[in-house]
Amino acid sequence: MDAEFFTNATAMLRAAAAGIRYDHIAAAHGVTKSTVSNRVRRLALALQQVVGVLEVDEDTSPSASLLRNHQDAYLEALEHFRPGAVPAHFEPPQTLTSAQVELLLGKIHQHSHAPLRDKALLLVLLSTGAKPLEIAQLTVQDYMDATGHVRNHSILRAEIATNHADRPLQFNCPDTVAAIDAYLAERLVKQLGASAKHGFRGLDPASRLFLSRDGRPMRISRSNTRSRYLVCKEMHEIFRRMFNHAGLAGLNTACARRMAASRMWEEGASHQDIGHALGVKCAAVHQLLKAAGAQHAL
């Protein structure tokens, strides 16, 4: 993405996000309305796929209303965007190979200030397909019962699910469980979210499953004062840092949903089962499987 295009498209995107109509933006820049639409769309997609826009899926079509509703999130992503790092024909990775996952875990171990937590976060993301906002709100008792046994077949509660409906939440991946257990053991040693009561391995069952480094629950807030959308900026930043460490351009949380959908399909789940687990419609499942390379699913 060259500097002149980026400067021009940035001005147009800022105007569109502020609610200015495309025909008015076109008149101000001396171009056609379609030119404005194409430039804004290209830049918005690059922000979604390279940086990540809070609570906007990476492959969502960036309409004018979406830009307005998530104005602050797009402008924040713009601050992190480096146009010179984006190839002319950029294609974000659709899924991760086992080797790439191992590479990313190694980078987390090397660079993270909370490696056990961040390794567990990555594996939960990849194995469940849950969204960062949903993961941020999970509690200890969502993961284990009072005896300390892992709930292999848990529930993503409607009150924290982005689609506002109970969904199945599987903690049945041995690597994911081992990573969470290691992190929770570290938490207990550091007395982060610990409880004097018996059960739940000495942890407060209502405490968040994943905490900030200083033991605080990560803050959930509205994306701006006018928005109905909730966000967890801290969780978003954690994943952003992880993906930056990997050195894989365009790596994002959408990869996790594709990988989870593909894994469930290979295990015999139907489109309906996958859609229910991920909180998406069957048409979206079809696209996830197609992008993941599960051509036999079509």
Image (cartoon, helix red, strand yellow):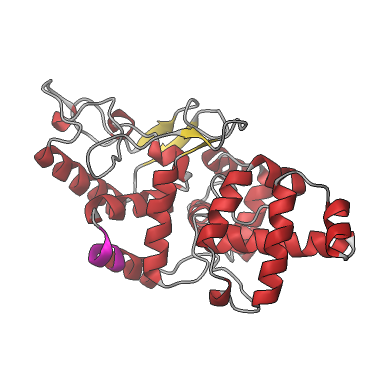
Q: What secondary structure prevails in the magenta region?
A: helix
- Of residue 235 and residue 278, the one placed in the foreground of this image is 235
In the picture, which quadrant includes the C terminus?
Answer: bottom right
- Of residue 199 and residue 242, the one placed in the foreground of this image is 242
Residue at the front extreme of this rendering:
28
What residue is drawn where x is 30% and y is 40%? 210
Q: Is residue 174 above or below residue 208?
A: below
Image spot of residue 95 (x, y percent)? 51, 64
What residue is drawn where x is 61% and y is 55%? 288
Q: Is residue 131 visible?
A: yes
What residue is drawn where x is 26% and y is 49%? 117
Q: Is residue 283 above or below residue 290?
A: above
Q: Is residue 97 magenta?
A: no
Image spot of residue 11 (x, y percent)? 70, 60
Q: Is residue 61 visible?
A: no
In the picture, which quadrant includes the N terminus?
Answer: bottom right
Residue at the top extreme of this rendering:
197
Q: Quadrant of residue 44?
A: bottom right
Q: Is residue 139 above or below residue 58?
A: above
Q: Quadrant of residue 208?
A: top left
Q: Quadrant of residue 226?
A: top right
Image spot of residue 241 (x, y percent)? 38, 59
Image: magenta residue range: 107-112
- Of residue 23 and residue 282, the one placed in the foreground of this image is 23
Image spot of residue 225 (x, y percent)? 57, 31
Q: How many marks?
A: 0
